Image: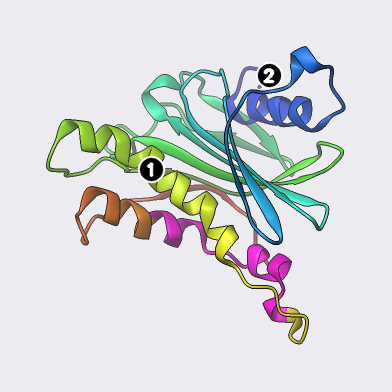
Amino acid sequence: MNNGWLTRIRRWIKRLFRPKKKHQSPTILKRWYGKNCAVLRLERKTQGAQATYRITSIYGCDYLITLDYLPDLHSEVLGEYGGEIIKLGSSDYPNHPASHRFAVFCVARNGVSVPVGIWDVDLQGYAKSYALSELAPQRATAGVALRCLQLANSSKSPAMTWLSQMERMNWLGLLEERIRGELSNPSHNLMAREIYHQQIA
């Protein structure tokens, strides 16, 4: 279990959010700023990592979005959450067309992370060129991360605050919308296999 994907990424998140020395800081590849948050594209030197975005808000609640290339993830046991073992090896579902693992975490400033959603998805599908199919997953993930910059904050309606909108965000729907645009294929289906999804009351 210690070698599982979920265990490894949660350890990485804990290191990312704990007070650290300069040499331990992750490399920030790009930054975007909005009124309620900033989006940082981070370098994550782990097996299969293709895109990592940290959404840092003014409300003390951050989000981390990760994209990993499934064929590079060799561990069968991903970890344990809420007493449930999360397991998915490449040989477990040989007929599933998933190419990537897309995950969203809600992270407190002390480094404690809670998965919001983890899905194995097909982000390649049909594209006009090989180069496009290779770039599309990363570009679609960037589009999902940057969506939070467009959220307007309304103090008049509790349901329309930036934080409440983030809590109700349809992450998988956003990803499908973005990848369809990147692949220029409006009928592309993520064929998503849900690994974990937090139930919002």
Q: Is residue 50 above or below residue 55?
A: above
Q: Provide the secondary structure element on which disc 1 rests.
A: helix
Answer with left or right where residue 135 lies relative to residue 19.
left
* Residue at the (81%, 58%) spot, across then down: 59
Q: Disc 2 to disc 1, how far (Cα)? A: 31 Å
Q: Position of residue 119 (x, y in %)?
A: 48, 46
Point out the stretch of residues depicted in magenta.
Answer: 159-175
Colour approach in the figure: rainbow
Q: Which mark is residue 2?
A: 2
Q: Provide the secondary structure element on which disc 2 rests.
A: loop
Q: In this orientation, which residue lies closer to the viewer: 96 or 36?
A: 36
Q: Position of residue 31 (x, y in %)?
A: 60, 40
Check residue 86 for magenta coloring.
Answer: no
Question: Can residue 102 be seen at all in this image of the molecule?
Answer: yes
Q: Residues within 10 Å of mark 1 (few under 14, many from 20)?
A: some
Question: Can residue 91 be seen at all in this image of the molecule?
Answer: no
Q: Nearer the viewer, mark 2 or mark 1?
A: 1
Q: Which mark is residue 139?
A: 1
Answer with left or right where residue 184 lies relative to residue 123.
left
Q: Is residue 72 above or below residue 174?
A: above
Q: Position of residue 136 (x, y in %)?
A: 31, 41
Q: Residues within 10 Å of mark 2 (few under 14, many from 20)?
A: few
**The C terminus appears in which quarter of the rendering?**
bottom right
Q: Which mark is residue 18?
A: none
Q: For the residue marked with disc 1, what is the amino acid?
A: Arg
